[in-house]
Image (tube, rainbow, N blue to C red):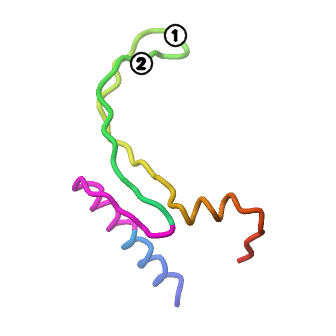
Amino acid sequence: MSAADAETIVETFFGSIAEQLRSGGRVELRGFGAFSVRAYEARNGRNPRTGAGVPVEPKSRVHFKPGKAMLERLNSKVSIKS
């Protein structure tokens, strides 16, 4: 497989995940984890340099929850070689 083909596949994969999340869905990759969108309301923040109050707009963020298999691999004492 060429680098260009691999890049196309990866871009298509991430594009599909982004589209599903944008439409309000959840994406679960078995053994890896799940992506979902969390909405955050507007709030008052603070400029750390001046201390002045700053309004922060509402926004959406991607949340990732690792799957059980991924957590087990990360926390195992056995080295995983690639």
7 sits left or right of 79 in the view: left
User: Which quadrant of the figure has residue 48?
Assistant: top right
User: Within 10 angstroms of label 1, few (less than 14), some, or many (20 or more) residues?
Assistant: few
40 sits left or right of 75 in the view: left
Could you tell which of marks 2 and 1 lies nearer the N-terminus? 2
65 sits left or right of 61 in the view: right
- Camera-side residue: 74 or 39? 74
Rounded to the nearest whole Å, what is the CA distance between mark 2 and mark 1? 12 Å
Quarter placement of the C terminus: bottom right
Residue 73, horizontal then vertical, whole percent: 65, 65
Which portion, as a residue range, is magenta?
14-31
Q: Which residue is mark 1?
A: 50
Image position of 60 with respect to 41: above or below: below
Q: Residue at x 22, y 56 (%)?
A: 23
Residue 30, horizontal then vertical, whole percent: 45, 70
User: Which mark, by number, is residue 45?
Assistant: 2
Image position of 12 with respect to 77: above or below: below
Q: Residue at x 30, y 25 (%)?
A: 42
